Protein backbone atom coordinates (compact mmCIF):
# COMPACT_ATOMS: atom_id res chain seq x y z
CA UNK A 1 0.00 0.00 0.00
CA UNK A 2 1.37 3.39 -0.97
CA UNK A 3 1.51 6.14 1.61
CA UNK A 4 1.78 9.87 1.26
CA UNK A 5 5.10 9.99 3.11
CA UNK A 6 7.22 7.18 1.67
CA UNK A 7 10.88 7.72 2.59
CA UNK A 8 12.08 4.49 0.98
CA UNK A 9 13.10 6.43 -2.13
CA UNK A 10 15.56 8.48 -0.06
CA UNK A 11 17.61 5.36 0.65
CA UNK A 12 18.69 5.43 -3.00
CA UNK A 13 20.30 8.81 -2.32
CA UNK A 14 22.12 7.69 0.84
CA UNK A 15 25.50 7.88 -0.91
CA UNK A 16 24.83 11.49 -1.96
CA UNK A 17 23.73 12.53 1.53
CA UNK A 18 26.74 10.86 3.12
CA UNK A 19 29.08 12.47 0.59
CA UNK A 20 27.57 15.88 1.31
CA UNK A 21 27.91 15.28 5.05
CA UNK A 22 31.60 14.34 4.73
CA UNK A 23 32.27 17.31 2.44
CA UNK A 24 30.52 19.81 4.72
CA UNK A 25 32.14 18.43 7.88
CA UNK A 26 35.67 18.42 6.45
CA UNK A 27 35.18 21.88 4.95
CA UNK A 28 33.95 23.25 8.28
CA UNK A 29 36.91 21.72 10.13
CA UNK A 30 39.37 23.15 7.59
CA UNK A 31 37.76 26.59 7.80
CA UNK A 32 37.82 26.50 11.60
CA UNK A 33 41.42 25.27 11.85
CA UNK A 34 42.54 27.61 9.03
CA UNK A 35 45.03 25.04 7.74
CA UNK A 36 45.53 26.94 4.48
CA UNK A 37 44.85 30.37 5.94
CA UNK A 38 41.66 32.00 4.69
CA UNK A 39 41.81 30.35 1.26
CA UNK A 40 38.27 28.99 0.88
CA UNK A 41 38.98 27.59 -2.58
CA UNK A 42 41.81 25.41 -1.32
CA UNK A 43 39.72 24.28 1.65
CA UNK A 44 36.84 23.33 -0.63
CA UNK A 45 39.21 21.44 -2.96
CA UNK A 46 40.68 19.50 -0.02
CA UNK A 47 37.20 18.75 1.35
CA UNK A 48 36.02 17.64 -2.10
CA UNK A 49 39.02 15.31 -2.46
CA UNK A 50 38.50 13.74 0.97
CA UNK A 51 34.77 13.31 0.35
CA UNK A 52 35.46 11.62 -3.01
CA UNK A 53 38.00 9.27 -1.40
CA UNK A 54 35.44 8.43 1.28
CA UNK A 55 32.75 7.82 -1.35
CA UNK A 56 34.98 5.37 -3.22
CA UNK A 57 35.65 3.35 -0.06
CA UNK A 58 32.55 1.41 0.93
CA UNK A 59 33.91 0.72 4.43
CA UNK A 60 34.37 4.41 5.22
CA UNK A 61 30.84 5.13 4.03
CA UNK A 62 29.48 2.38 6.28
CA UNK A 63 31.35 3.82 9.27
CA UNK A 64 30.06 7.33 8.52
CA UNK A 65 26.51 6.01 8.04
CA UNK A 66 26.75 4.29 11.45
CA UNK A 67 28.09 7.44 13.12
CA UNK A 68 25.65 10.03 11.76
CA UNK A 69 22.52 8.86 13.65
CA UNK A 70 24.40 8.72 16.95
CA UNK A 71 25.82 12.23 16.53
CA UNK A 72 22.34 13.53 15.67
CA UNK A 73 20.93 11.77 18.74
CA UNK A 74 23.62 13.32 20.98
CA UNK A 75 23.01 16.79 19.51
CA UNK A 76 19.24 16.53 20.00
CA UNK A 77 19.73 15.24 23.56
CA UNK A 78 22.13 18.11 24.31
CA UNK A 79 19.67 20.68 22.93
CA UNK A 80 16.84 19.26 25.05
CA UNK A 81 19.05 19.30 28.16
CA UNK A 82 20.02 22.93 27.51
CA UNK A 83 16.35 23.86 26.98
CA UNK A 84 15.36 22.12 30.22
CA UNK A 85 18.12 23.79 32.25
CA UNK A 86 17.21 27.21 30.86
CA UNK A 87 13.53 26.52 31.50
CA UNK A 88 14.39 25.74 35.12
CA UNK A 89 16.29 29.02 35.45
CA UNK A 90 19.89 27.92 35.13
CA UNK A 91 22.18 29.96 32.91
CA UNK A 92 24.97 28.91 30.60
CA UNK A 93 27.51 29.24 33.41
CA UNK A 94 25.62 26.75 35.59
CA UNK A 95 25.44 24.25 32.72
CA UNK A 96 29.18 24.64 32.07
CA UNK A 97 29.89 24.10 35.77
CA UNK A 98 27.78 20.93 35.77
CA UNK A 99 29.95 19.61 32.93
CA UNK A 100 33.13 20.42 34.81
CA UNK A 101 33.78 23.99 33.78
CA UNK A 102 34.80 25.61 30.51
CA UNK A 103 37.97 23.51 30.31
CA UNK A 104 36.18 20.16 30.64
CA UNK A 105 33.31 20.74 28.17
CA UNK A 106 35.45 20.19 25.03
CA UNK A 107 36.81 17.00 26.60
CA UNK A 108 33.26 15.69 27.10
CA UNK A 109 32.53 16.34 23.43
CA UNK A 110 35.82 14.70 22.42
CA UNK A 111 35.21 11.55 24.50
CA UNK A 112 31.62 11.21 23.27
CA UNK A 113 32.88 11.54 19.67
CA UNK A 114 35.58 8.90 20.26
CA UNK A 115 33.01 6.55 21.82
CA UNK A 116 30.72 6.97 18.79
CA UNK A 117 33.65 6.36 16.42
CA UNK A 118 34.71 3.19 18.25
CA UNK A 119 31.10 1.98 18.26
CA UNK A 120 30.76 2.61 14.51
CA UNK A 121 34.08 0.86 13.79
CA UNK A 122 32.97 -2.10 15.89
CA UNK A 123 29.63 -2.23 14.10
CA UNK A 124 31.28 -2.28 10.67
CA UNK A 125 34.44 -4.31 11.27
CA UNK A 126 33.68 -6.19 14.51
CA UNK A 127 32.11 -9.36 13.15
CA UNK A 128 34.66 -9.74 10.35
CA UNK A 129 37.54 -9.22 12.80
CA UNK A 130 36.02 -11.82 15.14
CA UNK A 131 35.67 -14.32 12.30
CA UNK A 132 39.25 -13.57 11.19
CA UNK A 133 40.69 -14.20 14.65
CA UNK A 134 38.49 -17.29 15.11
CA UNK A 135 39.74 -18.62 11.77
CA UNK A 136 43.36 -18.05 12.79
CA UNK A 137 42.83 -19.85 16.10
CA UNK A 138 41.02 -22.73 14.33
CA UNK A 139 38.24 -22.98 16.91
CA UNK A 140 35.45 -23.77 14.46
CA UNK A 141 33.08 -26.31 15.93
CA UNK A 142 34.19 -25.76 19.50
CA UNK A 143 33.45 -23.20 22.12
CA UNK A 144 36.26 -21.08 23.51
CA UNK A 145 37.13 -23.61 26.20
CA UNK A 146 38.17 -26.07 23.49
CA UNK A 147 35.39 -28.58 24.12
CA UNK A 148 32.83 -29.47 21.43
CA UNK A 149 29.25 -28.28 21.98
CA UNK A 150 27.05 -30.69 23.95
CA UNK A 151 24.34 -30.86 21.28
CA UNK A 152 26.81 -31.94 18.59
CA UNK A 153 26.32 -28.81 16.49
CA UNK A 154 29.23 -27.19 14.69
CA UNK A 155 28.29 -23.65 15.63
CA UNK A 156 30.36 -21.76 18.16
CA UNK A 157 28.72 -20.57 21.31
CA UNK A 158 28.67 -16.78 21.36
CA UNK A 159 30.15 -16.34 17.89
CA UNK A 160 28.29 -13.08 17.33
CA UNK A 161 30.40 -9.96 17.85
CA UNK A 162 27.47 -8.02 19.32
CA UNK A 163 26.67 -10.81 21.80
CA UNK A 164 30.27 -11.12 22.93
CA UNK A 165 30.64 -7.35 23.27
CA UNK A 166 27.42 -7.13 25.30
CA UNK A 167 28.51 -10.03 27.51
CA UNK A 168 31.89 -8.37 28.10
CA UNK A 169 30.53 -4.88 28.82
CA UNK A 170 27.82 -6.06 31.20
CA UNK A 171 29.95 -8.57 33.05
CA UNK A 172 29.74 -7.91 36.81
CA UNK A 173 33.49 -7.32 37.08
CA UNK A 174 33.45 -4.72 34.31
CA UNK A 175 30.41 -2.95 35.80
CA UNK A 176 32.08 -2.95 39.23
CA UNK A 177 35.26 -1.50 37.72
CA UNK A 178 33.32 1.27 35.93
CA UNK A 179 31.41 2.07 39.14
CA UNK A 180 34.66 2.22 41.10
CA UNK A 181 36.25 4.57 38.55
CA UNK A 182 33.17 6.85 38.58
CA UNK A 183 33.08 6.96 42.39
CA UNK A 184 36.82 7.69 42.54
CA UNK A 185 36.59 10.45 39.93
CA UNK A 186 33.66 12.16 41.67
CA UNK A 187 35.44 11.85 45.01
CA UNK A 188 38.61 13.47 43.67
CA UNK A 189 36.54 16.19 42.01
CA UNK A 190 34.55 16.96 45.17
CA UNK A 191 37.62 16.91 47.42
CA UNK A 192 39.52 19.15 45.01
CA UNK A 193 36.62 21.58 44.70
CA UNK A 194 36.04 21.90 48.45
CA UNK A 195 39.69 22.70 49.22
CA UNK A 196 40.38 19.62 51.36
Image (cartoon, rainbow, N blue to C red):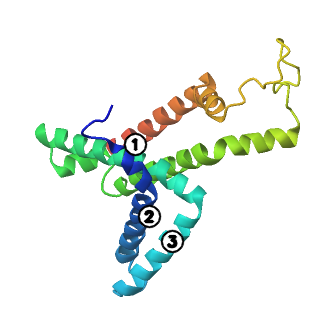
Q: Quadrant of the N terminus?
A: top left
Q: Is residue 132 left or right of residue 43?
A: right
Marks 3 and 2, how far apart at CA: 7 Å
Name the secondary structure under disc 1: helix
Task: Choose mark 1 or mark 2, whichever is in front.
Answer: 2
Front one among 160 and 9? 9
Mark carried by residue 189: 1
Give the residue drawn at x 24%, y 46%.
79
Quadrant of residue 6 within the rendered picture:
top left
Q: Which residue is mark 3?
A: 52
In the rendered structure, find residue 19 and report the number of the disc placed on it.
2
Q: Does residue 5 show up?
A: yes
Q: Residue at x 52, y 65 (%)?
A: 55
Q: Are marks 1 and 2 in contact (CB under 8 Å)?
A: no
Residue at image point 11% right, 39% down: 87
- On-image quarter of the C terminus: top left
For label 2, the SS is helix
Marks 1/2: CA distance? 42 Å
Tag 3 and tag 2, C-beta contact below 8 Å = yes
Between 187 and 58, the residue placed more toward the observer is 58
Question: In front here: 77 or 98?
Answer: 77
Q: Mark 1 or mark 2, which has the lower sequence index?
A: 2
Asked whether residue 111 is in view, the answer is no
Confirm or deny contact between disc 3 and disc 1 (CB under 8 A).
Answer: no
Q: Secondary structure at mark 3?
A: helix
Q: Which residue: 40% across, 81% down?
A: 43
Image quadrant where residue 143 sits = top right
Name the mark on residue 162: none
Amino acid sequence: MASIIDLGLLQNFQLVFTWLFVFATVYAILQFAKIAGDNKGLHSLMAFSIAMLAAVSGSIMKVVNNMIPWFILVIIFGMFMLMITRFLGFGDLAVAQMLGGDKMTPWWIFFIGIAILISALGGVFGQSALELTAGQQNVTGTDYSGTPPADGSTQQTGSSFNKQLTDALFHPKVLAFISLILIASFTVRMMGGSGM
